[in-house]
Amino acid sequence: MQLAEKMSRIGTESAFEVLAKARALEKQGKKIIHLEIGEPDFPTPAHIVEAGKRALDEGWTKYGPTPGFPEFREMIAAYVSRTRAIKVEADNVCVVPGGKPIMFFSMVALLEPGDEVVYPDPGFPIYESIIRFLGAKPVPMPLIESRGFSFDLNVLRDGLSKKTKMVILNSPANPTGGVIPKDDLARIAEMLRDRDLIVLSDEIYSRIFYESEPSSITGFEGMLEKTIILDGFSKTYSMTGWRLGYGVMPHSLADAVNQLMVNCNSCTASFTQRAGMAALEGPQDSVTAMVAEFRRRRDAMVKGFNEIPGWRCALPAGAFYAFPNITGTGMPAKELANLLLSEAGVACLWGTAFGQYGDGYLRFSYANSLPNILEAIERIRNISARWKK
């Protein structure tokens, strides 16, 4: 069977490839510490699970409206309006199964072959994958470690052209844990406000931050009308398997996204939407507790990495990833990641799995228990001691 040429341009997520290798080693009896997958290790909060069960019992098992149930969209609009200090309506909201459909559908609706898309590098690999798949031109924008893994704004300005159709922002960010400072967002808004382009603001980690609350570019003058907010329930409420996300965007684009949605998925599962309503309107204690635990793990992981010869690790401001610089070891990042998996039983990802500017870094998820994280650091330290001999 001959696949279409465009299939050669679509990428993947290395995290799932490493997970498969790690599982194979576990079948051989090796104990693996999983720090490769970006998935909260906390259970979905009980009141959300109960709402999902109740919805099943009550018969929420049929087709629902393609954009999402009106009452759910109204609840999301109120939540986004409150948390971003903006005004959006239910008609701006598209409910979809997970976050990725918002990336995919919005790019399909907007991009023509040859259009340029500016995106963060290192960044979530699906950005570049979809851009290339659609025949658009990816324009990677390096994130700078010394700036807390934010952009060099002069480089960003110079990377814009008349062909730039979309700019992707991700704050807090995967894989770096970086947060774009509010002053930087203000300057980015000035750069983009009068250009004929749209911003895809990936805010899936908006509730997972440690020092300063992240800002959304939609809060700056003229930007709400030209921004897509991507958010969802996977990270904040540990609902990765429920497949529940949403986008907030201008009405005209929402209509196009819903048209693509009806062609691809018909609708998002009805009972998961009821669970999502319980997540938004119910107690938020579980979110607060999860973030506090992530902070404890973050501090321990960063401290441990900075004590390993040849490693340097900045303190992540958000999300649940550490992105240590390992150039001091003299080893290529992918080679080191493979060695850590095979010899130390520690699964992580190499920086170039997230783009060319990730060279010299590793990504570790601290969505694992503190004892496991401390054991992983000890294993890495022991391996490191062997390199020096």
Image (cartoon, grey):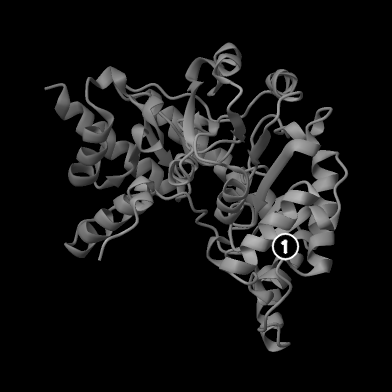
Residue at the left extreme?
Answer: 389
Q: Answer whether residue 45 is visible to the viewer in this image.
A: no
Above or below: residue 176 compared with residue 146? below
Residue at left offset 75%, top offset 37%? 226
Residue 295: image location, x then y, percent? 57, 39
Residue 352: image location, x then y, percent? 35, 33
Under mark 1, the amino acid is Ala
Res 71 quadrant in image: bottom right
Residue 285: image location, x then y, percent? 72, 55
Res 85 quadrant in image: top right
Residue at left offset 27%, top offset 35%? 380
Work out whether residue 49 or residue 86 is closer to the camera in this orientation and state it.
Answer: 86
Work out whether residue 210 or residue 274 is closer to the camera in this orientation and state it.
Answer: 274
Which residue in the protein does label 1 denote?
Answer: 279
Q: Number of labelled discs?
A: 1
Residue 30: image location, x then y, percent? 20, 56
Above or below: residue 270 compared with residue 362? below
For residue 328, side relative to residue 209 (left or right) = left
Above or below: residue 290 compared with residue 54? above
Residue at left offset 46%, top offset 34%? 322
**Disc 1: CA contacts within 10 A as few (<14), some (14-19) or many (>=20):** many
Q: Answer whether residue 146 is visible to the viewer in this image.
A: yes
For residue 118, side relative to residue 201 (left or right) = left
Residue at the top extreme?
Answer: 154
Residue at left offset 51%, top offset 36%? 298
Instruction: Tell me the quadrant of the picture where the C terminus can be found.
Output: top left
Query: Helix or strand or loop: what does disc 1 sit on?
Result: helix
